[in-house]
Image (tube, grey):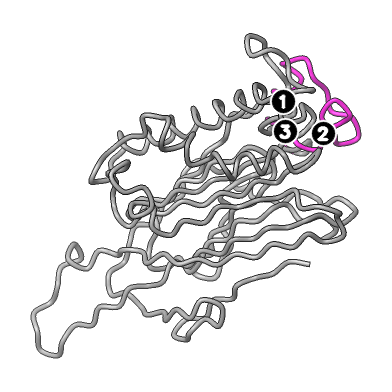
């Protein structure tokens, strides 16, 4: 079972009670880093798993031109997303919850003086735990520290290519540092791990980082735009990387054990940091420029049995 937040144009949304309006100005549509073949969904496994879904709405900004008034330039009417969110989590038939999520609609206000960034700003994370709840719970508690407090996260008032590249590098380092921290923490089982999907909004820019098989989907003009792809056995590039690092895929499982090829933790399956491991924590990134055609974003743990 999956919970959804339905968004209707020109009407209030029951869950979040947000009004939607049509914007006069048109934004530039751009999705970076995903092929059409990669947008094909992976076949589902049999069984039922815990799911966590976060729906973040990007309402359209209204701006009416007065009758008889001079026309207004596109620059003056540049689209600015209005970010609001809701979340749902269900344990299903499991004895304990292994999944966690983070939802921060106003990142600048949350971090205060720690962060100077383009506005609006928001952060979301979904962590799909396995082998027990320890790794996912650890990431929920410490993700903000790895991403923003202990790292030199880039500071800027405006978005440009240099800023976006710096953010991507900073997020990548945070994933890898969190992975090493899980190895060093003696209170966390070495067989406990978690996939991780994070999303950052800075101004009109959306940056998604994914390690594992959580899903990010952007609804653009009623069409689902994949913002992540699963790191599983059906991902050809991942299979090639696994083989090159000395691993193998057996019956759809990494080394016959794990259903994903990227995850944080799982140090019983990883080689020392100085060696190449088939199971890695390095995320892949997808980026897009938000426009008034974007209705909502969904982040969800992989749901089995669908």
Q: Position of residue 69 (x, y in %)?
A: 9, 84
Q: Where the N terminus falls, by quadrant?
A: bottom right
User: Where is 234 relative to 306, above or below?
Assistant: above
Q: How crowded is mark 1: few (under 14 residues within 10 Å), some or many (20 or more)?
A: many
> Mark 2, residues whose alpha carbon is within 10 Å: few (<14), some, or many (≥20)?
some
Which mark sits nearer the N-terminus, 2 or 1? 2
Where does label 2 land, which residue? 258
Q: Distance between the residues labelled 3 and 2?
A: 17 Å
Mark 1 and mark 3 lie on one chain; the one further toward the N terminus is 3
Q: Where is residue 52 in the image (x, y as percent from the top left)?
A: 68, 58
**Label 1 vs label 3, nearer the camera:** 1
Residue 290 as seen in the image, left or right of residue 44: left
> In whole angstroms, how far apart are the C-alphas of marks 2 and 1?
9 Å
Residue depth check, mark 3 versus mark 2: number of the one nearer the observer: 2
CB within 8 Å, label 2 to label 1: yes
Does label 3 or label 2 sit earlier along the sequence? 3
Where disc 3 sits, the SS reads helix
Number of numbered discs overlaid on the protein picture: 3
Instruction: Measuring from the top left, give residue 187's x and y in whole percent.
Output: 71, 30
| Residue underneath mark 1 | 279
Q: Nearer the viewer, residue 143 or 166?
A: 143
Q: Please check the rendered image and state whether residue 245 is part of the magenta-colored stretch, yes or no.
A: yes
Q: Helix, strand or loop at disc 1? A: loop
Q: From the image, tell me which residue sits under label 3.
A: 236
Q: Which residue is drawn at 70% across and 24% down?
A: 186
Q: Nearer the viewer, residue 34 or 146?
A: 146
Horizontal side of 292 relative to 244 (left or right) equals left
């Amino acid at each position: 079972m999956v919970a959804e937040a339905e968004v209707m144009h020109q009407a209030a949304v029951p869950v979040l009670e947000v009004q939607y309006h049509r914007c006069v100005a048109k934004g530039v549509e751009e999705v970076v880093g995903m092929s059409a073949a990669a947008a094909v969904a992976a076949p589902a496994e049999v069984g039922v798993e815990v799911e966590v879904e976060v729906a973040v709405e990007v309402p359209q900004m209204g701006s009416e031109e007065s009758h008889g008034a001079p026309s207004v330039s596109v620059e003056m009417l540049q689209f600015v997303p209005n970010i609001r969110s809701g979340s749902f989590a269900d344990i299903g038939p499991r004895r304990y919850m292994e999944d966690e999520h983070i939802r921060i609609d106003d990142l600048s206000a949350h971090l205060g003086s720690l962060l100077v960034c383009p506005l609006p700003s928001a952060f979301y994370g979904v962590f799909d735990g396995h082998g027990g709840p320890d790794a996912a719970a650890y990431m929920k508690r410490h993700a903000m520290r790895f991403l923003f407090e202990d790292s030199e996260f880039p500071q800027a008032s405006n978005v440009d290519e240099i800023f976006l590249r710096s953010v991507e590098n900073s997020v990548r380092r945070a994933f890898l540092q969190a992975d090493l921290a899980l190895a060093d923490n003696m209170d966390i089982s070495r067989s406990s791990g978690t996939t991780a999907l994070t999303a950052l909004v800075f101004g009109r820019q959306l940056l998604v980082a994914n390690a594992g098989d959580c899903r990010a989907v952007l609804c653009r003009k009623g069409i689902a735009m994949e913002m992540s792809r699963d790191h599983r056995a059906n991902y050809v590039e991942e299979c090639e990387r696994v083989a090159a690092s000395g691993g193998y895929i057996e019956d759809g499982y990494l080394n016959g054990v794990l259903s994903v090829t990227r995850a944080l933790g799982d140090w019983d399956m990883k080689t020392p940091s100085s060696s190449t491991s088939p199971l890695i924590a390095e995320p892949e990134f997808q980026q897009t420029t938000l426009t008034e055609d974007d209705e909502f974003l969904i982040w969800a743990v992989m749901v089995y049995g669908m």
